[in-house]
Amino acid sequence: MSAAKDLALMTDEQLLDLRLGDLRLSIKGTPLEQRIAKLYDELNARGLFFKPHVWLSEEWFTPDGVPGFAIPFYLAHPRLAKLERKQMFEAEGGTEQECFRILRHEAGHAIDNAFYLHRRRRYRTLFGSFNRPYPNWYKPDPDSRHFVLHLPAWYAQSHPAEDFAETFAVWLTSGSRWRRQYQGWPALRKLGYVDELMHELAGKAAPNKARRRVAELPKLELTLREHYRNKRQYYAFQWPPDYDQGLLRIFSSEPRHKTCPSAVSFLRRHRREICREVGEGSGVHEYAIDQMLIHLTHRCRELKLRVGLSPERTKQKVLVWLTVQTVNGIHSGYHRIAL
Ligand SMILES: [Zn+2]
């Protein structure tokens, strides 16, 4: 029954049978605890007394109206981080640098809620309406200079609330030279506004003192197996219907190539590498890219496609094409849930 202390010794199958609520994890005593302390120090160094409350849950998110945020459970135990990587190919926030990026981002949502910042007129003018519905997908403009660059996948472009959180995160980062880095970018006006706003809030207590913890780990009854099934479904990719053209530009259906290796075996052999490279290039979750690859492989089998070019050239074409396809429809991700 008592799960936490034995986690390190359990097999994947045994772990998947556990309920999230039975994991009995705690932030205390983990590297997470120190990272959160450092986040508080960073806020304090800027004169902000605000300290968002944090708790463990399924994912990273800041619930609507709550001046605190949830952290995924797998960051509280190395055995669970390993399982996350096995199930989803990556553990979001697993490295120190990535963890700090997300902590600062969530702190942006939390301070927004704590001081009701999105109700201000200038916020709405610069970032847009906080209450705009969240899209399931967004199509970023990778060249846009109207948004800061912080989390991967041009995440600031997904929603006004994310734009604010991302801008805040860039502003908060110690040693960040945002004035120089964003010189000449329209995004600098947003950073300047956040800077002004935070000077105004320095030393002030937040009016929203709610300490609500949404979907706190001990209350979650689903098993890890169910959790991962849902998560994979969430990331499942919807293919545009007309990608055959793209495949035919990379692979060949011509009779003269019929003795060449099949596209299916090529994609299978390079699966992990393609997922990793496209994931790095686009910032999209590797699991989503793997889903695309699975669809792609099926379609290559149906079209009986072969590798007509050199393996290197083929790989290069697959990487470029998949990255473009991915950027054309990026899943909005977790980070914030509408309640
Ligand atoms: Zn967010």
Image (cartoon, rainbow, N blue to C red):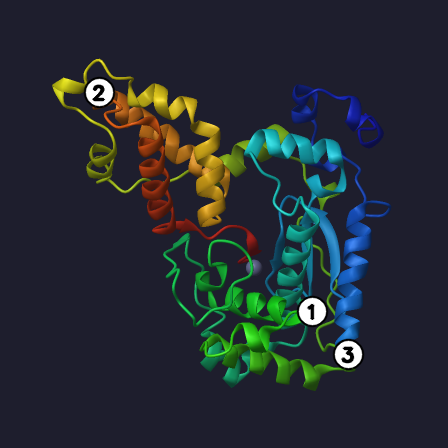
Query: Residue at coordinates 13% horizontally, 18% vertically from top-left?
Result: 255
**What residue would you read off at disc 3?**
47
Q: Within 8 Å of ligand 1, the CB of disc 3?
A: no
Image location (x, y in percent) of residue 289: 43, 38
Q: Which residue is mark 2?
A: 304
Decide if ligand 1 comes within 8 Å of the CB at mark 2.
Answer: no
The disc labelled 3 sits on which kind of residue?
A: Gly
Q: Is residue 200 left or right of residue 319?
A: right
Amino acid carrying mark 1 in the image: Gly
| Residue furthest top in the image | 259
Please give the name of the residue rendered at 57% of the width and 82% of the height, measured from the top-left corner: 192
From the top left corner, tell me how far across and down residue 266 is, in percent: 35, 23
* Residue extending farthest left: 255
Query: How many tags in the picture?
Result: 3
The secondary element bearing badge 3 is classed as loop
Rendered-image quadrant of the N terminus: top right
Q: Which is nearer the N-term, disc 1 or disc 3?
A: 3
Residue mark closest to the camera, 2 vs 3? 2
Question: Could you tell me if residue 214 is visible in this image?
Answer: no
Q: Which structural element holds mark 2?
A: loop
- State the residue position of label 1: 175
